Amino acid sequence: MGRKYAFFSNQTIKMRFQLWIGLVVVLFAFSIIVTFYLIEKKDRLHEAENQLKQVVTLQSLYIERWNKEKLDVIKRFAVSDNAKFHRIGELRREFQDYERVGSEFALISFVEEDGYIRSETDPTLKVYVGDRDYFKYAMDKKNFISGVVYSKDTGMPIITFSVPVLGDQNEFRGAVVGMIRLEMLNKLMKQLSFGETGEVYVLDRDGKVVTASTDASNDPTFVQTQMTSEIIQRAKAKSNDTSAYVGFHGDIVYGQYKWASGKSWIIVGEITQKEVFESLNQLSITIIVISLIALIVSIFAGMTIASRIEKPIRYLLRATKIIQNGNYDYQINPEKIKMAPIELRELCDTFNLMSEKLKTNITLLEHSALVDQLTEIHNRRYMMLEGNEQLLANIAANQTCSVMMLDIDHFKTINDTYGHLVGDRVLQHVASLLKHYAGAGTIVARYGGEEFILLVLRRNAQESVSLAEDLRRRLLDEPYVNGELTVKLTASIGVAEYSQTLEYGTMILEDMVSRADHALYRAKSGGRNRVELDR
């Protein structure tokens, strides 16, 4: 015991400073690494969950839109006069004309009310399909979208769409049936992959694979494979559990699900646990190495600067903690360290300069994160954050609000004709007009490309449609002019009013944007340069 006390009592100030500096650096680095790892692990997991939710929601919207588009094609044939009045020959010619213009359908047929598909050239040649699910649904006067079934003729996996044909008295007259090869849906799914290991599956209600975002979807043996992973049980039980589980390929994964097509299909997104935490683990190792280097440097530095840096270091440490807590423009008072060596005074002056620049840079970053650099109006991130808060505040105050989605018509033609520089100036011109004429109660933001989004506060649907019409006419009346160059502009606008019932997504603003986007699609499909209201 006496020797231990003698060891400490015989240490010089530099030795003690070196020892304590080493201990402080070790403890400080350890606490930072552990705290950083735990916080970052939670953040990465939360980020992965959000990414999966967004991907699954987006995939669901793609699938729903794809199914609706295909079902709408069949529906147009089913409600046509040729189908209604049983002019089968003319109806089949309509099928053939449609297939010649690049239809995705492998086959479109008319099923008689007795359940037979008859040959056009020889009525005695017929195929009975009255036992098929799509015909049974049609007899019940219901539309139908199948899972994956295998064609009896070709053995290829297909998806079937059917719509009943009804007479004047709403009596059953037969059905129009369209069949699409699964490879068409596979091509759509290939465009929707994410990450290195992220995969998206479309399953039927029994958990069998319909298609996937991986190359395996092209393998006939992969289609209709029964998935038995935990996510299927969660989907059937409508569970909100987000914990990791063993995925389809045997890896530990995180997953999200969403029902689609009237709860006929399940959209499942998965990403491996390894990918979620890979960069965090690498960063943690880097921090550990840096911390070890800092420890060695600190021990050697403590041998020479012990007696002369205590007070300035105390100010510097305090200042760094203040900046760490968010006060980025904090300054060290030079009067309090005027007796310190000139090197330390210069260090403190440099710190003050850095903190000043840091505050300026952070302010610029915060500004650029919420403002579109080209048009100098708000961007999509601002709308989804600040716009969403204002929307919720107005809804809480019982104020009616609407969302407009505006798309510049034929903008690609402008770029192709006049060049992208003129295209950029056209975007700036449109943004300026929207900001000028939209009014004080409207938030204007660039949504992406040639699309703009306007959040109209405290106005109902009709008032918003009136404002949309006014903006459309303004764009028409005030073209982009630069010297002798004049670029005439038109725009298509979709409008959606706030609704208590959410049709898309889980956020009110997200739902309104999706409905306004559907209205915009109708405006563009209806000939452009018009305003459509979501019904």
Image (cartoon, grey):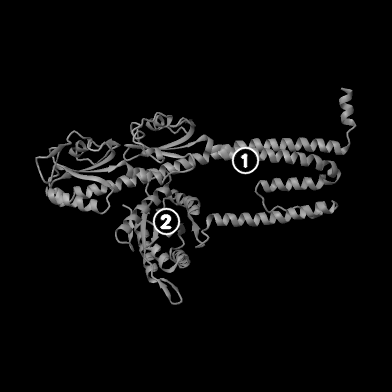
Q: Secondary structure at mark 1?
A: helix
Q: Residue at x 80, y 39 (%)?
A: 299
Q: Is residue 486 left or right of residue 124?
A: right
The residues tagged by marks 1 and 2 sit, at their Cα atoms, a distance apart of 48 Å
Q: Which residue has dot 1 on it? A: 283
Question: What amino acid is found at the position of numbered circle 2 in the picture?
Answer: Arg
Q: Which residue has dot 2 on it? A: 458
The N terminus, quarter of image = top right
Q: Is residue 505 at all visible to an observer of this figure?
A: no
Q: Residue at x 36, y 51 (%)?
A: 515
Q: Position of residue 351 (x, y in %)?
A: 74, 53
Q: Position of residue 195 (x, y in %)?
A: 49, 42
Query: Dot 1: within a 10 Å radius of its alpha carbon, few (fewer than 14), some, or many (20 or more) residues?
Result: few
Q: Is 471 drawn above or below residue 31 in the view shown? A: below
Depth order, front residue of 365/467: 365
Q: Is 35 drawn above or below residue 74 in the view shown? A: above
Q: Position of residue 47 (x, y in %)?
A: 52, 41
Q: Residue at x 18, y 33 (%)?
A: 131
Residue sticking out furthest to the top = 1
Q: Position of residue 385 (x, y in %)?
A: 50, 50
Q: Secondary structure at mark 2?
A: loop
Depth order, front residue of 531/75: 75
* Camera-nearest label, 1 or 2: 1
Residue sticking out furthest to the bottom = 484
The quarter holding residue 129 reads top left
First in sequence, mark 1 or 2: give its number.
1
The quarter holding residue 156 reads top left
Q: Is residue 127 left or right of residue 385?
A: left
Q: How many marks?
A: 2
Question: What amino acid is found at the position of numbered circle 1 in the picture?
Answer: Leu
